[in-house]
Image (cartoon, helix red, strand yellow):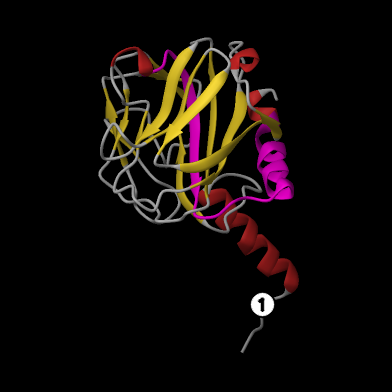
Amino acid sequence: RRSITKLQRNKIKICIMATIGGPNIITDGLALSLDAGSARSYPGSGTTWYDLSGNNFDYNIIGSPSHSDGAFTLTETTGFQASHNITNSTTATVVVFYKTTDGQELWATGQSNSRYLAASYGNNYYSSNAGSPSYYVDTTSITNPSSYRNGNYHMWEAKNVNLSTWTRMWFWQYGGSWNMNGTVAKIMVYDRTLTSAESQQNFNSQRTRFGL
């Protein structure tokens, strides 16, 4: 019986990583992977944004946001909805690659308005029934997101997120001015807290694409 060489195993590993999330994306604990720049995730038309993680957590695209250059451009009447319980983790990580100049927004909501993550206006972040998240931009810990709303892409992260009581997770769907005017390219959710080295690896793998 032929054995698989180390080189062949590495090639298989690279192929799997590219299928799930992109080159060198951390896949350990990856529960959701949406990528508007991948034809496997969004083929260019339709109202479904397909999950690449293998968990089939596909999302409905709400309000017909425009799609170009591998990203969706959102307004305050658009966003992404699904009824999935992505993870019950008490230490989840949410990663989003997007750009905006909107001074008021909210990343995600649960099954009621009392569950939300990364509500922000002015110089602060707020959350409810999501534990005590810590926030990062381009791997740097932050408490004030306002200076990063500069119309350029960034890798935004929320770590140590408690999703144990969430039965769904909607993105930029809270209502009114809390929905965002901006451009979203990639969303990932992990069922654990990523290490600093893992966040750096995700950042490095996408920096050319997003000009980071």
**Residue that appears at 68% across and 68% down:** 8
Answer yes or no: is residue 138 visible: no
What span is in magenta? 179-207
Please tell me in which quadrant of the rendered image residue 23 appears.
top right
Q: Is residue 196 left or right of residue 146?
A: right
Secondary element under disc 1, as helix, strand or loop, is loop
**Residue sitting nearer the eye, 66 or 198:** 198
Which image quarter holds the C terminus? Answer: top right
**Residue that appears at 32% across and 44% down:** 58
**Residue that appears at 58% across and 36% down:** 157
Please tell me in which quadrant of the rendered image residue 134 appears.
top right
> Where is 210 relative to 25, above or below?
above
**Residue that appears at 35% across and 12% down:** 177
Q: Residue 139: percent from the left, percent from the top? A: 70, 35
Which image quarter holds the N terminus? Answer: bottom right
Residue situated furthest bottom in the rendering: 1
**Residue sitting nearer the eye, 121 or 50:** 121
> Where is 32 relative to 72, above or below?
below
Q: Residue 109: percent from the left, percent from the top? A: 35, 34
Q: Residue 36: percent from the left, percent from the top? A: 45, 31
**Residue sitting nearer the eye, 161 or 131:** 131
Q: Residue 77: percent from the left, percent from the top? A: 29, 15
Answer yes or no: is residue 188 visible: yes
Q: Which residue bears the numbered disc 1?
A: 4
At label 1, the amino acid type is Ile
- Image label count: 1
> Where is 153 relative to 110, above or below?
above
- The verdict on residue 182 being magenta is yes
